[in-house]
Amino acid sequence: MARIGVFGAGYVGLVTGACFAELGHDVVVRDVLEEKIEQLRAGQVPIYEPGLDELLAKNAERLAFTTSVAEAIDGAEVVFVAVGTPPTYSGDADLSAVWTVVDELPQGERDLVLVMKSTVPVGTGEKIRNALDQRGLTNVGYVSNPEFTAEGRAVHDFAHPDRIVIGAFDEADGDKVEALHAGIDAPIVRADVNSAEMIKLASNAFLSTRISFVNEIANVCELVGADVQKVAEGMGLDHRLGPHFLRAGIGFGGSCFPKDVSALKQLAGNSGYHFQLLSAVIEVNELQKRRVISKLQRHLGRLRGKRIALLGLAFKAGTDDTREAPSLVLASRLIAEGAAVSAWDPIVDAARLLPQAEAAESIEDAVRDADAAVIVTEWDQLRDLARPEIRDLMARPLIVDGRNLLDPAQARAVGFAYEGIGRPVSFGDVLPETPERQHELEA
Ligand code: UGA
């Protein structure tokens, strides 16, 4: 068993640390945020990730938390870098946290392997290798080992990956990292460092492309009277296409897809290639988030003075993460249109995220007197939204289902006007026009 250091106590770092401890290794997780480390030492987990609390508690003996670089590295054979690489204004990845880790590595005699978990542009490994060599740190090896865990199921994904990618300059360093994964049953892809970095970016970009593609199919389905759910089912049975990532909705969000698509596009651009397809993937996604607004307008006319309930704020179910969440775009567009917004989420603190909206304690509170309820996140708690008690609380019984979570026929049978994404709107779904609406339409 090895001694491992992990830099970064975010989603990726904590899951990586906890899972390697579960495999029997001794792990020290280091973060710059004192408060976070204190919390972790006290047994509190600063993020919501199913199964992580239990795993950290179960392996507490093999896990330590520190703010000190020296402690994280002391005795470690392998050091993972799992710090954030957020997008900059230009769309490139901000690598300052990565470089800080590299710069902080002390001079030493001992062999150490630095392993990049964070998603970085292709070519980063080569730059870091050069920087290490220039500082005389030839004893430090470098390996790219991108993570493929999805939030909300990260612990499961780590233990049951589709593949483990290891890109190394020196085969012996790659072997060391491979050995750490003993006990995980998955194909191992050994590659050069550039290709390993590209596997990660290309995988996320391709998954994003599938989502934007199916979202455009959905938009066309609405115009021609087809149902994207059926279409995706029929497409997904073709084994060359497969069923995954064909759920139409209000666009992809989160800390990975938007950032990685944009980083790959910028990387290509900076290298002299215009990656046209990715520009479209990004644009389609931005427009998709806004389509809910036109759906609401179609039913309600002008949104000024209307009351809209946003149900779900996290970028997807099973996480408290709201980075690049469609809820943020929707809330600010609605407020800009003059609507009153109430917001509910089972985990996200609505008052903190959206101070301009009214934070609701429950789904009932959120929909009370609302002119429409918008399903933004596919939380299980929303699956039975279309019930008479909810209908009776609302000023108008309109549901815009941004995740195609509900059964349209059932919702309509209860008396809701229902609109999903890429599903036919049946006659009668557009609410009867009130005198106010008539007036607005004429204005
Ligand atoms: C994603 C990848 O799935 C992971 O493999 C990868 O490791 C991770 O990014 C990363 O780079 O760190 P994650 O962002 O946690 O994981 O979430 P996903 O479950 O992949 O969902 C991403 C977005 O796509 C969400 O907004 C989701 O609602 C949306 N989505 C997903 C759809 O709109 N339709 C689909 O069919 C699937």
Image: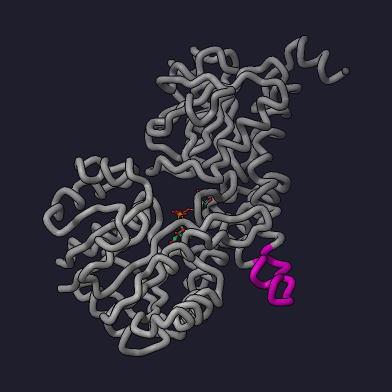
The span picked out in magenta is 265-278
In-image side of 348 versus 307 (left or right): left
Q: Where is residue 212 in the image (x, y as percent from the top left)?
A: 62, 56
Q: Where is residue 374 in the image (x, y as percent from the top left)?
A: 56, 30
Does 83 lie within the magenta span?
A: no
Quadrant showing the N terminus = bottom left
Front one among 120 and 323 = 120
What residue lies at 45% left-to-right and 16% top-to-bottom?
Answer: 365
Quadrant showing the C terminus = top right
What residue lies at 60% left-to-right and 34% top-to-bottom?
Answer: 419
Q: Where is residue 326 in the image (x, y as percent from the top left)?
A: 57, 41
Does 271 lie within the magenta span?
A: yes
In-image side of 354 versus 69 (left or right): right
Front one among 313 and 440 = 313
Front one among 17 and 183 = 17
Is residue 269 in view? yes
Vertical side of 185 occupied by 319: above or below: above
Q: Mainly helix, strand or loop, the magenta region?
A: helix
Front one among 415 and 308 = 308
Farthest residue toward the left? 61
In-image side of 327 versus 32 (left or right): right
Farthest residue toward the top? 435
What residue lies at 20% left-to-right and 52% top-to-bottom?
Answer: 55
Is residue 207 in view? no
Vertical side of 57 occupied by 134: above or below: below
Vertical side of 200 occupied by 370: above or below: above
Q: Which colour scheme is used?
A: one colour
In-image side of 264 versus 273 (left or right): left
What residue lies at 43% left-to-right and 23% top-to-bottom?
Answer: 363
Quadrant of the rendered image containing residue 305:
top right
